[in-house]
Amino acid sequence: MKFSWKWAGGALTLMLAAGALGGQVYADRPLTVVSWGGAYQDAQKKVYFEPFKKESGKDLIDESWDGGIGVIRSKVEGGTDSGWDVVQVESEELVIGCDEGLFEPIDWDKIGGKDAYIAPAVHECGVGAILYDNVLSYDKDKLKEEPRGWSDFFDTTKFPGKRALRQGPKVNLELALMADGVAPGDVYKTLSTPEGVDRAFKKLDSIKKELIWWKSGAQPPQLLASGEVVMTSAYNGRIDAANRTDKRNFGIQWNEALFTLDSWVVLKTSPNKDVAFEFLDFIGKPENQAKLPEAIAYGVTAKGATKLIDPKRLPDLPTAPENIENALQISDSFWIENIDRLNERFNTWAAS
Amino acid sequence: MTSERTQLKRDLRKAGGRRRLTAILLVLPLFLFLLFSFIIPIADMLRRSVVDNELATAWPNTTAMLQAWDHSSPPDEAMFRALGTDLRASAEVRTIATPARRLNYALENGRSLVMNTGRSLRALEGEPQSWRDTLLKEDPSWGDKKTWIALAQASGPLTDFYLLTALDLERDPEGTIVSRPPQQSLYLDVLLRTGTMSLSVTLLCLVLGFPLAYYVANAPEKTGNLLMILVLLPLWTSLLVRSAAWIVLLQDQGLVNAMLMAVGFSDRPVPLIYNRIGVLIAMVHVQLPFMVLPIIATMKAIPTAYMRAAISLGAHPAIAFVRVYLPQTFPGVAAGTLLVFIMSLGYYVTPALVGGANDQMLAYFIAYYTTSSANWGLAAALGVLLLGATAVLYFVYARLTNLGQVKLG
């Protein structure tokens, strides 16, 4: 076919029209909520997203992501709407992104006020979504005695056999210090000194030969189930899920657990800020939050929610008073500052 | 006559030109693909490993001051003023996190130093009498020479910081290149580990693959085809699935250990996984086809008459094999070993799944710095290290084996 200006002109017009139309649709697009996928997002869909749509009459679509501050950065840096409004981020991403101005400051008046939430859930740029734990987990069928805390994790005479920890320094240095007798409240004070870091590595060194390293949250229950290890650090929700769906008999030691929060943020470039805060208000209401732990064993952040949860479910949650009593919150500021250096040290240590 | 000749010439040229144009058009998509998916990204990676403009973008005044600084005299009030105003301005427009991150690579407390000072300066009203006093009151570290050296070394536009780090080196305050402290010296070990593991995998593949290839190449067609399918089958299965399958097989309660214990080889499970042995087994399994296929290809092309001739001339079959057959397989062996070795150098998934913490290869660290910590400068520098090591080995190998005659695949 011969090149024809008429055709080209037609195509161009069509493209422009489609672009304009697309732009138009984009500007009035539904609220887009981004979370972590899998069983967790399914639970959120059931208790948050669908009810919000029904109650508010507003349209909402949900997407999932795998984290990484780089992703958020590239979404916001263009300065124009990139299609995402509300995103659930990990605590470090919350701090870094807030420092870089990638998130809209939270308007607390619109979501019930700061006092409606537990203290760790309140941040300049985000509101806590869930609270979850890194716990010591073990197979109740194999261990006669319950390990009482991280010092038992390091006691290979009382509990012979292999153990698993997450590959990397984060969480491990903290639990090593607790095993070495440092009170949870003093862990980061100790870890801020070179001697404290040495002490943590020395403690890890004492069971290095018995250690297997896991990388994804799905691995710890598998390692326990296959009998590869007798004890492991794990995310509490995964262990609970293995017990409920696979009928395992895994135990969770809540003493000296390390907890952290994921938070909801609103992207700076969102054209749907009002609806976004309306959504955050809806899912921040105690009566709505109380429904989430039924679906997945994570703690919620609204102060009034806990007393609305089925009392039978409470002991499974990180937020139950007796579970959080002796738990330590993972310090974002410490890790943002030190992760690269300690990661190098960890890898050098692991290789020697 | 002359005009006919020129006419002919013109036609020829026209035809030649058209053919050349067709050739270019046929190659063009591939060339564009390579350009955008390979050449440009690699060039960009090389660039990222030496470009250092994070500080300069956020703090232009400070950077200008630092470039005029001699690195030894104590910083004067003008430098403190430049830093103070830059800090405050970047804190107000929220660009301060980038220089904070950059300084944290070089200074123990870099991030908090910058962020905390920036936060306080934002609240500061008007112009202070002495920027020096103001900054020192915020944090005495601003008076340290170490801090200013780090600032100066980060002020770009070019840097050797990342490349030196990738080689376990750093610059001391005087600017001399020195080794990094042993607790932070890691990447040369990792590079050595990457090289040794790739070499082991390659040798194991050769030892297992050569006899197999010989058998397949000389077996009757039906058996040969069947064996060929068995060789190719693993290639059609996802790498992830194969690695995961090895976990199931090799774990303490796995099939292999059950067998070892059943035949009385051992009375307790042999640690076969989450260590070097596991990585070697799984990687050899993954790489074997890439060794076997080129060798089979060469062996099939070797005329059987040569061996028969050698034997009929009185050579012992073993001697004939070594002196006549073996040299003819070298191009295939060379292609296979090179392919397996270079592919192993960049391995990531298999060691990550079946290896322990001390079995991670260079690719693991590149992935870590790109996705998790967003330190692209260091990721790029490690990439350059890997690329450099691969190139050096390739040329050494080419020298040793006369690679000019070898065609891959």
Image: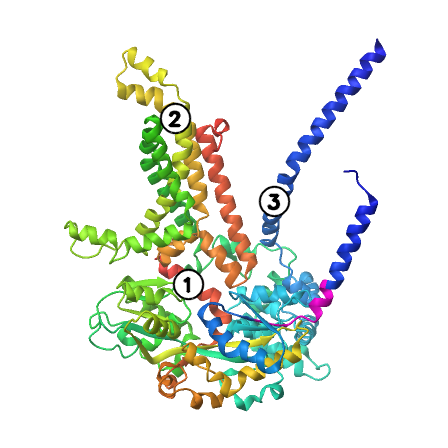
Q: For the residue marked with disc 2, what is the amino acid?
A: Met
Q: CA distance from mark 2 to mark 1?
A: 49 Å
Instruction: Provide residue B76's location: percent of width, then percent of height.
Output: 67, 71
Rendered view: B389 above or below B180: above
- Residue found at x 70% / y 27%: B19
**Residue B337 in view (yes/no):** yes
Q: Secondary structure at mark 3?
A: helix
Chain letter behind tag 2 = B
Instruction: Determine which quarter of the picture holds residue B374.
Output: bottom right
Q: For the residue marked with disc 3, what is the amino acid?
A: Ile
The residue lying furthest to the left in this view is: B264
Q: CA distance from mark 2 to mark 3?
A: 35 Å
Tell me if residue A297 is in the magenta stretch. no
| Display coloring | rainbow
Chain letter behind tag 3 = B
The residue labelled by disc 3 is B39
The residue labelled by disc 2 is B299
Task: Evaluate if marks 1 and 3 touch, with contact meaning CB atoms under 8 Å apart.
Answer: no
- The span picked out in magenta is A22-33
